[in-house]
């Protein structure tokens, strides 16, 4: 039996006056409330909700809201209310049916007594708000699996994420005050939340800039000290944007920005849009900065011409050594680069020597912020480090155990697909991916199968934009270009014959004849670079490292090369 109740009131001055007589807890008890109209929603918590409503009635940003739901529970305390408030804010933003008016600095994820018990109550409260009050359009599993939720700026930051953001902001505002231009690097493995804090920082900066100093600040966080008229004045006329090299991830982030007050989809840019801009930027946050391009043959012919034109516009001549990172530096006073030196997957990407140099320079300047805590993968040990070690020249000496994390090696591809389908039916977001070891026949011939293997016939992704959430994705195979930067609940990885193992030399080997990403093996005559098999092996190992670290709850593996399969059986 539930202990809570949800009361509904019109949001007007006359109703607020009558609240105290309805229930004394409206004046002296921790509660959570939801205010909304058809387009907007605001979630708050208070020990005196009647008094809080009087304050909201004076607020320009809340005046257009029409209804209030008050969640009352005799067992509520301050910690539980802060947790419920954060939970509902995340759910509303992930649902996407209304714009969330809250600041993101107040989102918490603190432990407290009996939290697990309260979490069950929170889910019941959500269901009542969804079914009885019709405030949500989607269920919790649907919301949690959505890009709007996974890429939301309303995330509760962990300790090292929050520390990094705070340190970056201290340096950024200090640089603004002194007039110094600067660049910082946030470095982290897959799943440490680089994209999350990139989005979080832009939302936080916009909240600081837009905050009305006359309105009480209803948050208590390490970022509260930035909500001052002085900080708002420093940000008043600044131009911000986020740069995302990959199209699929860029489109997903643009959808998040479109539904977030203070942010706009036009703030999400390609590197080419940055280079072409006639106005400089005050701050550019670059997600997946390792995927910025050096001068190389681009994916589309017109982009090669555009690369030359941007170089000439920005630097006066077309220097082939100039990279898209140079565009970022030229076009912005400040930049924040989200970086993982082990996620370069094509020769056109910034070379590993360059990304390591960037990280080393930032470290020397005291502007390198490492992220350590794994936020994606539900393993009790360093799964990402283990996978990278397995794919390295110095593999582990003994296999490791990752507790409840579901890591399995299959010798029957059909069985792996059936197991993955079971996971899809239970928790969703379970997808099959592969290395680019088969040509993309179905791109031109929709009836053709791309991958015919072990009695299975499969096709590559039919779309390159938001493939994971597309209707056909459950029956297709995604490539590195559709999943890098995304989370899955379960991932099935086919390691093709582009990667093999030499048991005599005891080393991984690359097979060029079975690697069909044309841009992934293309030489660079403009820079005089010819890529050897050893060079391309490093890119292919990085690709499989990325694919094998997408799954939150589990990773299933099928290996084509017999010798490599036997080797991996020692570790998986």
Image: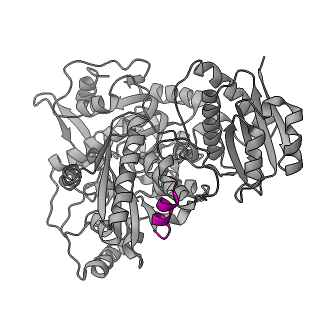
Q: Is residue 451 left or right of residue 506?
A: right
The question of residue 224 being in magenta is answered with no
Whether residue 259 is visible to the viewer of this picture, yes or no, is yes
Write down the quadrant of residue 113 in the picture: top right
Q: Residue at x 85, y 38 (%)?
A: 19
Q: Count how many numbered circles sit on residues in the image.
A: 0
Q: Residue at x 48, y 37 (%)?
A: 488
Residue 384 placed where, x, y %? 32, 33
Residue 189 placed where, x, y %? 33, 40
Q: Is residue 165 above or below residue 180?
A: above
Q: What's the magenta region? A: 228-238
Q: Residue at x 25, y 83 (%)?
A: 316
Residue 400 placed where, x, y %? 29, 19
- Of the 4 image quadrants, the one containing the N terminus is top right
Q: Is residue 270 above or below residue 2?
A: below
- Of the 4 image quadrants, the one containing the C terminus is top left
Q: Main secondary structure of the magenta part?
A: helix
Q: Is residue 318 above or below residue 378?
A: below
């Amino acid at each position: 039996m539930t202990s809570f109740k949800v009361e509904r009131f019109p949001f007007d001055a006359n109703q607020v006056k009558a609240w105290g007589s309805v229930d004394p807890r409206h004046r002296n008890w921790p509660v959570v409330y939801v205010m909304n109209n058809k387009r907007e929603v605001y979630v708050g918590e208070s020990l005196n909700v009647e008094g809080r409503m009087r304050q909201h009635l004076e607020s320009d940003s809340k005046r257009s809201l029409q209804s209030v739901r008050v969640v009352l529970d005799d067992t509520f305390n301050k910690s539980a209310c802060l947790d419920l408030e954060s939970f509902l804010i995340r759910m509303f933003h992930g649902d996407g049916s209304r714009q969330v008016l809250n600041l993101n600095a107040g989102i918490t994820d603190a432990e407290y007594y009996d939290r697990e018990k309260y979490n069950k109550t929170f889910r019941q409260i959500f269901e009542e708000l969804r079914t009885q009050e019709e405030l949500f359009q989607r269920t919790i599993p649907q919301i949690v699996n959505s890009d709007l939720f996974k890429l939301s700026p309303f995330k509760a930051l962990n300790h090292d994420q929050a520390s990094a953001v705070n340190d970056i902001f201290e340096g950024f505002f200090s640089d603004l005050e002194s007039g110094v231009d600067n660049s910082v690097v946030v470095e982290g493995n897959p799943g440490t939340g680089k994209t999350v804090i990139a989005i979080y920082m832009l939302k936080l900066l916009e909240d600081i800039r837009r905050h009305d100093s006359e309105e009480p600040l209803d948050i208590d966080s390490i970022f509260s000290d930035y909500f001052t008229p002085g900080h708002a004045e420093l940000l008043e006329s600044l131009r911000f944007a986020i740069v995302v090299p990959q199209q699929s991830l860029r489109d997903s982030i643009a959808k998040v920005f479109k539904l977030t007050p203070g942010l706009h989809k036009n703030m999400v840019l390609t590197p080419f849009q940055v280079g072409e801009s006639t106005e400089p930027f005050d701050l550019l946050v670059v997600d997946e900065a390792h995927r910025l391009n050096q001068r190389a043959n681009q994916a589309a012919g017109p982009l090669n011409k555009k690369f030359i034109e941007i170089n000439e516009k920005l630097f006066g001549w077309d220097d082939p050594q100039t990279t898209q990172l140079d565009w970022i530096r030229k076009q912005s006073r400040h930049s924040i680069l989200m970086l993982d030196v082990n996620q370069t997957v094509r020769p056109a990407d910034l070379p590993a020597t360059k990304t390591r140099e960037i990280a080393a320079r930032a470290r020397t300047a005291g502007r390198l912020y490492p992220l350590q805590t794994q936020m994606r993968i539900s393993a009790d040990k360093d799964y990402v480090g283990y996978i990278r070690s397995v794919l390295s020249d110095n593999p582990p000496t003994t296999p490791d155990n990752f507790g409840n994390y579901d890591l399995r090696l299959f010798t029957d591809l059909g069985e792996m697909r059936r197991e993955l389908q079971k996971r899809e039916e239970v928790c969703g977001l379970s997808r099959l991916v592969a290395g680019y070891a088969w040509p993309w026949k179905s791109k031109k011939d929709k009836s053709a199968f791309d991958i015919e293997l072990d009695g299975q016939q499969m096709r590559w992704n039919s779309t390159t934009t938001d493939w994971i959430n597309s209707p056909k994705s459950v029956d297709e195979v995604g490539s590195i270009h559709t999943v890098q930067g995304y989370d899955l609940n379960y991932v099935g990885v086919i390691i093709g014959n582009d990667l093999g193992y030499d048991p005599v030399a005891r080393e991984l080997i690359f097979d060029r004849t079975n690697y069909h990403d044309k841009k992934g093996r293309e030489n660079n005559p403009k820079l005089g670079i010819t890529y050897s098999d050893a060079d391309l092996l490093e890119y292919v190992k990085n690709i499989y490292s990325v694919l094998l670290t997408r799954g939150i709850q589990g990773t299933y593996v099928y290996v084509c090369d017999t010798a490599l399969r036997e080797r991996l059986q020692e570790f998986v």
